[in-house]
Amino acid sequence: MIQESAAFTPQFGASAIARILWLIPAVPILASGVIALMKQPQRKPAATLAIGSLSFSLLLSLIAFGHVLAGWAHSAVVRETVNFAWFHFGRTSVDLGWVLDPLAAIMLVMVSFVGLLIFIYSVGYMAHDENYTRFFCFLSLFAGAMLGVVISNSILLLFMCWEIVGLTSYLLIGFWYQKPSAAAAAKKAFITTRFGDVFFLLGIVWLFAQTGTLLFYNHGVGSLEGLALANLLTQHAGLGLSAACAIGLLIFAGAAGKSGQLPLHVWLPDAMEGPTPVSALIHAATMVAAGVYLIARVYPLMQIGAGPNGSTTALTVVAWVGAATAVFAALIAVAQDDIKRILAYSTISQLGYMMAGLALGGVAVGMFHLITHAFFKALLFLGAGSVIHGCHEEQDIRKMGCLRVDMPFTFITYAIGMLALCGFPIFFSGFWSKDGILEAAHSWNISQVPFYLLAFGALLTAFYMTRQVCYVFFGYWRGHETAHESPGVMILPMVILAFFAMALGLIGTPAWPWFHAFLDNHAAPFSFHGFAEPGLGWLMLASSLIVFLGLGLGWKFYGDKSPEPEEPDVLEKSTPKVWAALRNRLYVDEFYGATVIAFYAWWARVADWLDRRVWGGIVAAVAWLFGLWARFNRLLDVEWVDGSFDKTCDELSSGGGLLARVQSGRVQDYLRILAVAVIVLAAILLWSSRP
Amino acid sequence: MIGATPLAGYLLVAALLFAIGLAGALTRRNAILVLIGIELMLNAANLNLIAFWRYGPHPEALTGMMFAIFSIAVAAAEAAVGLGLVISIYRHTNTAELDKISRMKG
Amino acid sequence: MAGKLDQIFILLRDWLAHFLPAALRPAAEVVLGVIAIVCVFPGLFALTTVFERKGLGRIQNRLGPNRVGPFGLFQPVADGIKALIKEDIVPFSANAGVHFLAPLVLVVTVFMGFAVLPMGRNMVLVNMDSGLLFYFAMGAATELSVFMAGWSSRNKYSLLGAMRAVAQMISYEVVLLLSAVSVVMISGTLSLPAIVASQNTYSGIWPHWYIFTPWGLAAFVMYAIAGTAETNRSPFDLPEGESELVAGYHTEYSGFKFALFFLGEYLAMFSISGLGTTLFLGGWSAPFSFLTLIPSWIWFFGKVMVSIFVFIWMRGTLPRLRQDQLMNFAWKFVLPFTLLDLLVTALWRFMGEGWARWVVCTVILVAAYAVMGCLGLSRKDIGPRSYRYAE
Amino acid sequence: MWRAKGVEGSAVVLFAARFGTHDPWRDARKDGRLLSPIFYILAVLTLAGGLASVTLKHLVHCALAVTVAFAGLALLFLQLDAQFAGFAQILVYIGAVVILIVFAILLTRGSDLPKEGVFSKTWPVGLLIAAAVFAVLGWAVLQSVRAVPQQAAVPAVTVRDIGIALVGRYVLPLEIVALLLTAATIGAVIVAMHEKVRSR
């Protein structure tokens, strides 16, 4: 894209900032390239470069955001695209390009801001790691690729960045590749996401085949614009699905792979083998959000042809999957003991919320939860990281306790994040975003089941978070050596994130739905009549009650009593069966092990058998025939050929000896040979050029 | 008389000088002498260049002259480096006789 | 009349030449010029020896030579006769041919230098387009003669002296050349008469000599230092320092060959001063516009003699340097400063008229001089002497 | 004042030879019919120097002989109206290269004779090859030179022209040569530097 800037033709509409938008991803990628060339001991320059480049991107993103904001304030539809042909084959051309619209702008700011905070945090967290520079190289490569995903206006470009993101996630999960578990987790993540990406690629190809363009928005002829969509809608893909719907589902498969939706979520918990900043950055804030963002980006495609009930098949599927994932993951989270695993599962369930929000309430609802979640989940992961750091790499919450005394800052910030995640009323952003989703689900007129599922998920969320916090910060210290508070460079980002975890909610309240207005491009009036919608008040009350219920239950069970590490969990005593099931992640991995993997193993055995017996047999027969032929030849050789051949060989070797003698190591001999060569050459030339 | 034209005369002198230099470079045992021979060859080339410049069609273009001047400069560099090498070789293998130095023998 | 007096030598030569057939005239003129040079400068040399000895005598608070002739003016004649009738010793193991050639090469090459020096209006033997280059080419050739002398006489002191001399000459020749280049940059020509002509203008009564510009002054100082070293004069006379190597490369020379060396050195001194005069002191041009009546050659030789006197003065005053100090001085102070001066000259050339360039160039040069001087003083290489050669 | 073209002037200074404005041989040379005797003198001088430099036994003698050859070449350049090149030749070769060679000889104890002769055992081969090279070159010259047009008139090229060409059309080669010289100087210093000095 950078190299191609020669073939780069900015549109007339594109403003200066839109024209240089490509710098936002380009700079971190460039930085990672430079860092890759650095030597291991050059720690400080590497970190400085990474952070500097990302803050540059943040600056540009803020400028872009301001630009879009200004346009929105003048109630103009801001969507600027810069497209150029990468290369042509035949009559079709492969176009790349980038777009600047409210969605991209908000996402840009979020990604680069959270990313920057996490970079800073990693300076402290990775301080003792010897592969510091490699870490920052991967990190900035990831940041760049993610930003590329955000701004890309061509689905091909998006897919490229998407794959780079997958690659970096693989590299970062396997960062401590000497740990076999980490290596395995990395492989798992890579393969699982590839599984989704295959469908995604199919969707891309199909889309390209149908619409003939790769661009999303291209002045009315892009694939997400009226003409192409109408065309897609008329095409039929069988099963009573329109092409648009089918493509949407394929793309959703890719998104599900990336952001751990139900069938493909298995890699996300294992991904916690990576360093904690990675877990925070990739598997909470940004990368997993890429799937959600993808759906938001292609939302017109999903939405087109919405029936009387205001939904399409694709969206319905998304909604169900999301809701299911939300509850499913929340259930598992209840029974985990690894502090990061709990957060991982909560991430999965929150992603489910986002998907459901997208499907039920539209782009704004889902994206709002994405943004708020990015902040408070990053905060929670950083807190967890700080706890792990402080407890000397201990991750089992049963071996902690009473940390509120040892690590006060971590405790406060973590509590804020936890409350935000639970959706504690009024003061925390999670409340407003989750409430939006619940409201949307409640007003969904296909079925009420998703609403109840999501509500139950909210209850579980509050419960397991309380459990975790009780284990970690209350009770008495159950570890061996005493914990210590983390350095300031780790605390600071947490404080900042905590602030946003609380404040961000205010831009999406029903009273002032600024966020939704911004995304949907209409004005945002400020009035408390927003609350006056029928049922909204009740709904808010209900969800608050649910949250309080969850918190209360959690406190009642785990409160301040903090059992011994060995003694079984409270719930385990009451319902061992369920507990065991939850504890073992509802046997999903085992299920895959028993079905998919078993099938592959069986197929491998079959192939092996085929190889050995069938093909092998044929090969053997052929070989035998050739062996026969060879024997015959050998006879010929030994009789006739060899004699002369051996003679030749001897002559050759003796000649080699002669040649070797030429290499006498005496300069003058070489000079002599040179002179002779010159003579011959000159003679030849002269002779040939004789008049 | 040699060469009906002056140019031929100069070229022949240059050729002879070149041959002499080559002979020196090929037959002497001391590295420094070899370098001297090489210098002689370079000078013969310079003589050719100047002669062609003088008797060529476009002397005002100065090409041959420039070529000669540059080659003089380069020859100076070459001499400096070559003699430095000879000295360092002498330091290592206490001799400057080329046929005693055959460490690169294949 | 003044013009005639100015051109008297030219007229004389033409008058002598017109006896010959026209075909041979130009050649004859040249030959006459050569004869003139060959006669005048040795005479000057003879005079100078007396002056030097008497001057040194004064400086060292004693009478110089005062027996032979009035005020010992005929001393050089006596010395010359002595040198001629003295036995000419060639060491047994010496390399006779080279030993014989060395002084000749020296004297010849030094004489060649005079061919391009303008000694007065129109008084230049060969007005060559690239005279300066010719001069330096000839100067380069003298080093070889020194080496020949030192090597051929098979004497360790001679060899050491020769190597020192060659090393020193090469190091300072670079400086000599560069300081001359600054003049070439301004005057835009390599022909010495043209350089003199470019200085031969006056604003009011004041001449436009290059020494009266910041870069010119700096270049002149560097040139003087380098010239002193080039001619092996004190304080740079290590190659023949009696106290350490008996008499350097001409230890083994006696009689007339030694006299030739002696002559060669003084001639070198003259030609260096002559070149310095030509480059920086306006050659044969008068110091004030109202003095132009006085013949140009008087001015030239006057300036040369003044600089000769300065040479003698320095010899009487300054102590001798040490080899490593000499080299350090050459490569770590003089050369860098000269290079800087080249830059300043370019600045001068491109800043155009006006007082600004005066201020800028002066400031730069003074600052550089101060900084380099401090560095030089702070360097602690005033320790035990160490030689790179003769190990 | 008689203003000679530099060539003849310097020639006169170098060996006070006879030269005139209209000297039959010179005119003949001008329209390129035959070569001036000075050419023969110089050629013989140069070749003799070269021959001596490669045949003499004593290294220092070789150095001196090669000096003669260089000087002869410089004079040949002057003969070819290439003043600048000629003086540059003297300045660089006699002033620098020969001195370098001499230093190298003394530093490598080259001044004392080796026991077994100065020529390598296989000298006849070298001689043969050199002769062959000369044969080919001479053949080439004699074959091709008739084709080359003869430029009789003396090219009027001043040092100013050369300077302008150097900083104008040939400025890039000039820069490159400058770079090369710098690199070569540093390289030579480092190569020839004492290990002691390097470690210090």
Image (cartoon, rainbow, N blue to C red):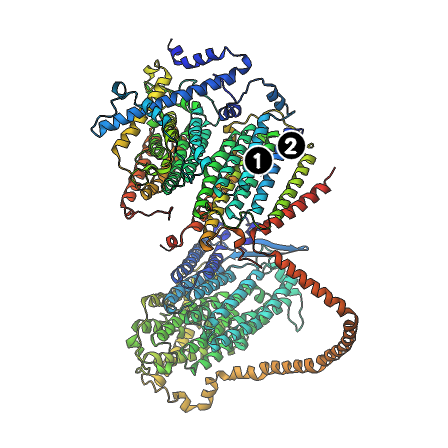
Residues tagged 1 and 2 counted as in contact (Cβ below 8 A): no
Asked which quadrant contains residue C140, the reply is top left
Viewer-nearest of labels 1 and 2?
Answer: 1
Q: Residue furthest left?
A: C61
Residue B63 shows up from this direction = no
Q: Position of residue A479 (x, y in %)?
A: 33, 82
Residue lying at 67% horizontally and 60% vertically, measured from the top left: A655
The residue singled out by tag 2 in the image is B8
Q: Are marks 1 and 2 on the same chain?
A: no
Chain of the residue under the numbered disc 1 shown in the image:
D
Between residue A412 and residue D137, name the one nearer to us. D137
Residue at (63% x, 29% y) in the render: B6
Point out which mark residue A61 bears: none
Is residue A469 found left or right of A99 in the rendered image? left
What SS does tag 1 mark? helix
Whole-percent x and y of residue C332?
35, 42
Alpha carbon separation for disc pair 1 and 2: 16 Å
Residue A645: percent from left, percent from top: 74, 67
Q: Which residue is mark 1?
A: D47
Q: In which chain is the residue bearing label 2?
A: B
**Three-letter code for the amino acid on which mark 2 is drawn:** Ala
The secondary element bearing badge 2 is classed as helix
